[in-house]
């Protein structure tokens, strides 16, 4: 089946020039899993993306990744000579000007192949660095991570009635968005759970102490304030995040006027600018008001 899918993709690409989009992750065994996506213009003159393969390599250095990319393309039946762009994240392993994959691929194929830093990854870097700049926000997410682990205990999970908490992933700021969303909609359920465990002697002292500490932290106005603030900010960035991952996204599309049936990219940018300009006068007041409403009494 996989062979048939690959053959169909190669047929779709045909003699077209194409862009490669590559990302790698290391699995628990230490092997590198390398996803290779090709982007090309189909017969209807539409931008098209296809996941060509997910290859594995014993090592994750730039030379190995470069060799793997070329080998997998050739094995599938695509000529590496028809690569016109390469898109990766901004890690030095991939983007390095002297020894990164983008440089080694150009040297291996002996021609210039422009490298594009993934715009979605750039957005991730902006968001993650902004969140990391404030210690109170870091402490908030540390508490969320403790909550996640606490609620996964079998004896605790059986009592929890709220939405399932999300596991925080440093590589994906969207996991932070999901976490904050669950904390807000399940705030009362979490508080009820922590109160119940704190009051029951059937739980060990360590579990009750942890529940009491989490309840005390969540009872602080600052916890609800940060939750509301971060959720509001990230909710503005979620649509651009989705847009930047869409198959029909390109540099011209971002600045072009909206057409029927297409997302309004300019509107999203204006919305973020408006949010930033009204931050102090409007947004902070609303967050402050919400944070002091319906707080649990500890």
Image (tube, rainbow, N blue to C red):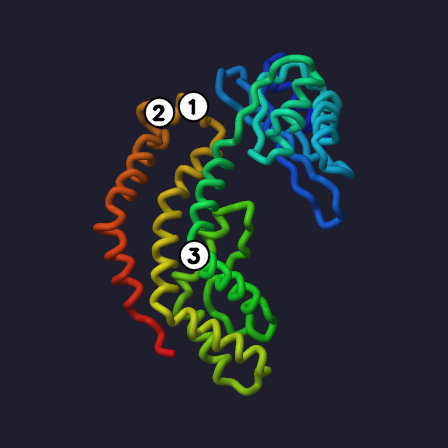
At which x and y percent is residue 129?
47, 45
Local SS, label 3: helix
The residue indicated by pointer 1 is 251
Percent position (x, y) of residue 145? 53, 61
Q: Are marks 2 and 1 in contact (CB under 8 Å)?
A: yes
> Could you say which is closer to the camera, residue 227 or residue 187?
227
Residue in view at x 73 percent, y 29 percent: 63
Residue at image location 47% in from the left, 74% down from the top: 193
58 to the left or right of 81: right
Q: Mark 2 packing: few (<14 Cα in 10 Å), some, or many (20+)?
A: few
150 versus 128 height, above or below: below
Instruction: Compare residues 206 and 189 and report the one nearer the observer.
Output: 206
Which disc, if any, is residue 137?
3
Residue 255's disc is: 2
- Near mark 1 (Cα within 10 A), the count class, few <14, some 14-19 or many ≥20, is few
The picture places residue 232, in percent across and down from the top left corner, at: 34, 51
Q: CA gap, disc 2 to disc 1?
A: 7 Å
Crowding near the residue tagged with mark 3, few <14, some 14–19, many ≥20 C-alpha atoms within 10 Å: some
- Direction right: furthest residue: 58
Residue located 59% across and 36% down the image: 91
Q: Residue at x 62, y 17 (%)?
A: 83
Q: Earlier in the sequence, mark 1 or mark 3?
A: 3
Decide if residue 295 is on the left or right side of residue 179. left
Residue extending farthest bottom: 201
Discs 1, 3 touching: Cβ within 8 Å: no
Q: Quadrant of residue 82?
A: top right
Residue 201 occupies quadrant: bottom right
Q: Which mark is residue 264?
A: none
In the displayed structure, 173 sits above or below 104; it is below
Query: What is the CA distance from the residue labelled 1 to the residue labelled 3?
Result: 33 Å
């Amino acid at each position: 089946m996989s062979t048939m899918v690959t053959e169909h993709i190669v047929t779709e690409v045909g003699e077209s020039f194409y862009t490669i989009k590559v990302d790698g992750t290391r699995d628990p065994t230490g092997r590198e899993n390398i996803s290779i996506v090709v982007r090309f213009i189909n017969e209807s003159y539409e931008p098209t993306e296809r996941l060509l393969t997910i290859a594995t390599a014993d090592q994750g250095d730039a030379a190995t990744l470069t060799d793997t990319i070329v080998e997998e393309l050739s094995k599938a039946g695509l000529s590496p000579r028809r690569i016109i762009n390469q898109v990766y994240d901004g890690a030095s392993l991939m983007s390095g000007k002297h020894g990164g994959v983008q440089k080694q691929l150009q040297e291996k194929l002996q021609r210039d192949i422009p490298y594009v830093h993934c715009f979605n990854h750039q957005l991730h870097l902006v968001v993650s660095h902004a969140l990391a700049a404030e210690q109170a926000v870091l402490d908030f997410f540390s508490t969320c991570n403790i909550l996640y682990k606490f609620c996964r205990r079998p004896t605790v999970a059986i009592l929890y009635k709220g939405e399932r908490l999300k596991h925080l992933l440093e590589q994906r700021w969207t996991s932070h968005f999901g976490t904050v969303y669950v904390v807000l909609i399940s705030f009362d359920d979490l508080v009820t759970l922590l109160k119940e465990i704190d009051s029951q002697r059937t739980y060990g002292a360590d579990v009750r102490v942890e529940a009491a500490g989490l309840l005390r932290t969540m009872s602080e106005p600052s916890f609800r304030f940060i939750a509301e603030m971060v959720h509001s900010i990230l909710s503005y960035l979620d649509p651009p995040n989705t847009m930047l991952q869409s198959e029909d996204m390109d540099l011209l599309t971002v600045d072009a006027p909206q057409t029927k049936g297409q997302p309004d990219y300019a509107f999203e940018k204006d919305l973020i600018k408006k949010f930033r300009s009204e931050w102090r006068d409007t947004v902070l007041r609303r967050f402050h008001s919400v944070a002091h409403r319906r707080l649990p009494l500890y």
